[in-house]
Image (cartoon, rainbow, N blue to C red):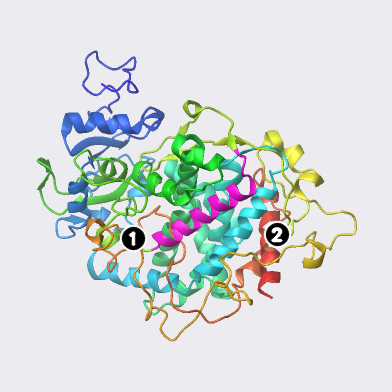
């Protein structure tokens, strides 16, 4: 028995799985499991083999696929395994509690991830075509500017929580930008996504998210812009309102919570793992290697891809009943002892982006965002070090994600770079450091006589914000490219994405066989398609200017703690982006 699964007061002595649910499956939804999932996977593998019974929530039984080969059989076997939750036998028979916190994550929605065949192809085409219109070069520039703005708000303090102060907010700002969300909607969506993954008031969070997307769709019907939401609305596939709202729920949720986890899990390796920490201290960055290792060993979604057998089948010597949930453990499959391949930098054979018809098509851009986030942080704070021991880190519970609760760091205080104009009073550090971060020295609050909207004008000669140098010399045009680019056929010249690194045989890459038919899992980081055709300059999304006026109109409404600070940040970024593209 794993030392991390000590018997509780109600556990019978000698129970083979000390931390089991009432029906015998290992509970993978609480803090006990979150503290050491690797030990739990070893325990399950030793007792049950490559497929093991678990509980996703109290009373919610499933079979967890631990074996790499077995996982591929499910992911690539649509003839035997369906994504449609209407096949869930326990739900159809009324054996699932109506108030189960996991229902919002498992009930059927008309989205790519819950459909098969022609319906799946139609929905997927709308998603792919919309993302193909996003320019990754300019997306990089926006992420760099947003990262600078966040670091400016705590760099003068000398300490930060990289979860609350950085990684939790950066993906939200990026999603606001890509989907044309107002800041208020984006803040609500971020809280709702976290609640659903943590199974905390998940039903309430799901209902609020649905309302957010109804509001967003109404906004974009009235004022369409150059953003993913507007493109989905206008797509020839003719998505219904229900399909649009639910697809937005999946896509935006996919771009916030798991992207945050990917950034943080790689940062943890860079800070604590001696192999990476020594190089970091010496000024030698290994960001790609840290991301690869995080995807192999600590994927942002540890257990997901829920399938339902279409008939009674056998998998890895284990009988599976028709309609019983089958969940892929990416984390366990990636670390399957029977897997005879190197789990090293450049290896793309891990399953963290899924595989088969439902592979994530936006993995390259998700990686781009994580890379830029880490590069910027380390560039700005090169002497950053952990403020606690690794054994003091805590992980957020939940059956699906691998998510740090906090990542405290300290560093020599540094001056803000003021690359992005700062609206007055927009510090976003956590409460204990609020006074210091909200001071003019810390955040660059406006002196008397500032512009009426509280945002400093762009003046490069006076040290104001300048266009972000997002690419090596010669790779970015003088006139910054927009977030979007048009062409007669935006997919005609698109190269294949996710190619393995040099020296890594494509045959060992499960993504290579799946690129032609793939879609983002709910919760898989999803942003722009990272490889796009040659771009033609157009103007940047209208969402930036829209959000600034909306934020001011809503300023008198009751707000959650920190809402005004985050709204100020979004105003600052919107102003900076409009000035930059002008």
Q: Classify mark 2: helix, strand or loop.
A: loop
| 1 or 2: tag closer to the N-terminus | 2
> Closer to the camera, 386 or 485?
386
Q: Classify mark 1: helix, strand or loop.
A: loop
Classify mark 1: residues with Cα within 10 Å, few (<14), some (14-19) or many (20+).
few
Seen at 18% across and 55% down, the residue is 81
The numbered disc on residue 502 is: 1
In what quadrant of the picture does the C terminus appear? bottom right
Q: Which residues are magenta?
A: 362-384
Q: Is residue 14 magenta?
A: no
Q: Position of residue 340 (x, y in %)?
A: 20, 45
Residue 558 visible (yes or no): no
Tag 2 residue: 420
Quarter of the figure with residue 505:
bottom left
Q: Is residue 333 left or right of residue 449?
A: left
The numbered disc on residue 123 is: none
Residue 40 visible (yes or no): yes
Q: Position of residue 84 (x, y in %)?
A: 25, 57
């Amino acid at each position: 028995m794993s030392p991390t699964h000590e018997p509780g007061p109600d556990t019978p002595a000698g129970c083979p799985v000390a931390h089991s649910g009432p029906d015998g499956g290992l509970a993978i939804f609480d803090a006990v499991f979150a503290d050491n999932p690797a030990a739990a996977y070893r325990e399950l593998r030793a007792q049950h083999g490559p497929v093991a019974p678990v509980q996703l929530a109290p009373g919610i039984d499933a079979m967890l696929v631990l074996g790499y080969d077995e996982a591929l059989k499910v992911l690539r076997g649509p003839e035997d395994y369906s994504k449609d939750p209407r096949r869930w036998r326990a739900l159809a028979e009324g054996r699932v509690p109506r108030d189960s916190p996991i229902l919002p994550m498992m009930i059927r929605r008309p989205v790519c991830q819950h459909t098969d065949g022609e319906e799946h192809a139609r929905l997927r085409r709308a998603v792919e075509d919309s993302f193909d219109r996003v320019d990754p070069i300019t997306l990089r520039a926006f992420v760099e500017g947003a990262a600078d703005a966040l670091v400016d708000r705590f760099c003068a303090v000398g300490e930060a929580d990289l979860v609350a102060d950085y990684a939790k907010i950066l993906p939200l700002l990026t999603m606001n930008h890509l989907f044309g969300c107002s800041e208020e909607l984006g803040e609500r969506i971020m809280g709702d996504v976290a609640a659903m993954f943590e199974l905390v008031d998940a039903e309430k969070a799901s209902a609020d998210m649905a309302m957010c997307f109804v509001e967003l769709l109404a906004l974009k019907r009235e004022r369409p812009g150059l953003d993913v939401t507007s493109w989905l609305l206008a797509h020839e596939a003719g998505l219904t309102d229900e399909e649009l709202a639910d697809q937005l729920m999946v896509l935006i949720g996919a771009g916030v919570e798991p992207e945050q986890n990917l950034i943080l899990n790689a940062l943890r390796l860079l800070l604590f793992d001696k192999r990476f920490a020594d190089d970091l201290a010496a000024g030698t960055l290994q960001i790609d290697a840290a991301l690869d290792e995080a995807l192999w060993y600590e994927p942002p979604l540890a257990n997901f891809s829920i399938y339902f057998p279409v008939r009674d089948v056998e998998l890895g010597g284990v009988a599976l009943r028709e309609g019983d949930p089958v969940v892929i453990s990416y984390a366990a499959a990636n670390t399957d002892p029977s897997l005879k391949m190197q789990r090293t930098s450049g290896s793309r054979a891990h399953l963290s982006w899924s595989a088969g018809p439902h592979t994530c098509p936006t993995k390259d851009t998700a990686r781009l965002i994580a890379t830029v986030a880490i590069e910027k942080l380390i560039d700005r704070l090169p002497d950053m070090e952990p403020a606690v021991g690794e054994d003091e880190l805590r992980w957020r519970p939940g059956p699906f994600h691998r998510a740090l609760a906090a990542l405290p760091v300290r560093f020599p205080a540094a001056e803000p770079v003021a690359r992005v104009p700062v609206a007055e009073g927009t510090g976003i550090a956590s409460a204990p450091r609020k006074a210091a971060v909200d001071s003019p020295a810390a955040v660059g609050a406006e002196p008397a006589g500032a512009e009426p909207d509280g945002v400093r004008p762009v003046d490069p000669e006076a040290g104001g914000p300048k266009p972000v140098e997002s690419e090596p010399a010669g790779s970015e045009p003088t006139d910054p490219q927009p977030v979007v680019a048009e062409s007669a056929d935006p997919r005609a010249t698109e190269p294949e994405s996710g190619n393995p690194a040099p020296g890594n045989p494509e045959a060992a890459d499960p993504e290579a066989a799946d690129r032609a038919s793939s879609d983002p899992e709910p919760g898989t980081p999803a942003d722009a398609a990272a490889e796009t055709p040659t771009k033609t300059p157009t103007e940047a999304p209208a969402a930036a200017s829209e959000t600034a006026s909306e934020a001011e109109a809503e300023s008198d409404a009751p707000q959650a703690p920190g809402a005004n600070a985050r709204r100020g940040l979004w105003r600052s970024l919107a102003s900076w982006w409009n000035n930059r593209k002008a």
